[in-house]
Image (cartoon, rainbow, N blue to C red):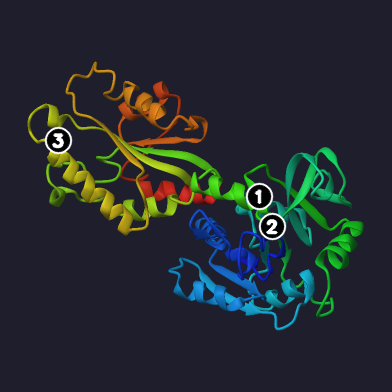
Amino acid sequence: MECIVLAGGMGTRLRSVVSELPKCMAPVAGKPFLEYVVTSLEAAGFGHIILSLGYKHEYIEEWAAARQSRARISCVVENEPLGTGGGVRYALSKATEENVFVLNGDTYLDVSFRRMLALHESSGAVATLALKPMRDFDRYGEVALEGERITAFREKRHCDEGLINAGVYVIRRNALDALPEKFSIEKDFFEKEVSRGTLAGFVNDGYFIDIGIPEDFERAQEEFAGGVYKRLDTLFLDRDGVINVQIVGDYVRRPEQMEFIPGALEALALMRPLFRRMMVITNQRGVGRGLMSEEDLKAVHDYMCGEVERAGGHLDAIYYCTVPDDSHPRRKPNPGMMEDVLREWPDTDLSRSIMVGDKPSDMLFAERAGVRGIMVDGSFTLRRLADKLTEEL
């Protein structure tokens, strides 16, 4: 997939909280806001990201050049303002795919790009807009939808509930070829196409924020620091047989004995943008049997966490039970360790979480803990799960 990110905004309304920076480079929870946008695109499988730049473009170009990216990033710079449509038309000249996504660098929408593209292609629309259901709003105009077709754009007014244009759309690469160099995509393209019945709408109720005003910019600081914006909440992982190769008849007693399953470290890096948190929940009765010490186990886990970090992933916590007695409430499949999680992380949303294991006891633990369980094995590995979730989301 291929997309354009409109990143040339001046951020006039943010001048009170952000100095002379392009709006998309405003720092949110310690990172430029554009970092979250691009990371989400990489996680969704975009291979080419075109940054459409204008105001203070040097800041963004330096950031892009220094960034280690999984996708190819290109920059196009407007030497003079071309309007919301002219900028897109110019950036489309750098695209190669038949259909190209376009989004704003100062808004974040949790959307399934693949499902949106599928609807766009099946509908035959010239462009398909992501529409976000909202309540009690007057900051945005309302979009009328009948079936898959957008039938009207209504001016800003107070609405008790309705759909808004969330600033993400997919468009045919040649759709703007006949338009002039400078134009408004809203007035000169969308409003004309809606009268022809050629615009489709993809309703999406995922997380949405626009940092264009100070109030929402401040809200973003807390929500992005806490990972609220991510599609899934927590990835719970068994350890042996999921992340590392299980030693038959023995335990991983020392760091040098830990052999990672092929693709496991890469999988954790790929899934990091999808999950708010990642945690290991593992039985380790080798300690309880006196075959290793808790200090040995800590050394193994420190090594594992370091390797996960080096690969681009992150583990927020590790829960383990060293008691050999199967009836102990903290030993899987009993749910005691999940109760520990909920005490320490009370905002955990189990309905948006996944438990990954390689044994029936892990799946029974998931059932008792009230979380979706996924079994991995030699053919369906953690790496394949990462690919599957990326495709679904």
Left or right of 346, for residue 118: right
Measure how far apart labels 1 and 3 are at the Cα level: 46 Å
Q: Identify the image quadrant of residue 325.
A: top left
Instruction: Tell me the mark number nearer the camera, choosing from 1 and 3.
Output: 1
Is residue 251 visible in the rendered structure shown here?
no
Q: Residue furthest right?
A: 195
Q: Which residue is mark 2?
A: 212
Left or right of 137, for residue 275: left
Instruction: Tell me the mark number nearer the camera, choosing from 3 and 2.
Output: 2
Which residue is depicted at the point 63% across and 63% down?
A: 105
Q: Amino acid at mark 3?
A: Glu
Q: Residues within 10 Å of mark 1 (few under 14, many from 20)?
A: few
Is residue 300 visible in the rendered structure shown here?
yes
Q: Which residue is mark 1?
A: 216
Query: Dividing the image into 4 quarters, which one contains the N terminus?
Result: bottom right
Q: Residues within 10 Å of mark 2 (few under 14, many from 20)?
A: some
Query: Is residue 389 or residue 294 the one in the foreground?
Result: 294
Query: Is residue 18 or residue 78 the one in the foreground?
Result: 18
Query: Is residue 264 or residue 34 the one in the foreground?
Result: 34
- The answer to whether the residues at label 1 and label 3 have Cβ atoms under 8 Å apart is no
Residue 150 rendering spot, x and y as whole percentages: 84, 51
Q: Which residue is mark 3?
A: 294
Q: In the drawing, what numbered circle is on residue 152? A: none
Query: Is residue 294 or residue 373 the one in the foreground?
Result: 294
Q: Residues within 10 Å of mark 3 (few under 14, many from 20)?
A: some
Residue 299 rendering spot, x and y as whole percentages: 17, 45
Mark 1 or mark 3, which has the lower sequence index? 1
Q: Amino acid at mark 1?
A: Asp
Measure how far apart labels 3 and 2 are at the Cα level: 50 Å
Label 2's element?
loop
Mark 3 or mark 2, which has the lower sequence index? 2
Q: Amino acid at mark 2?
A: Gly
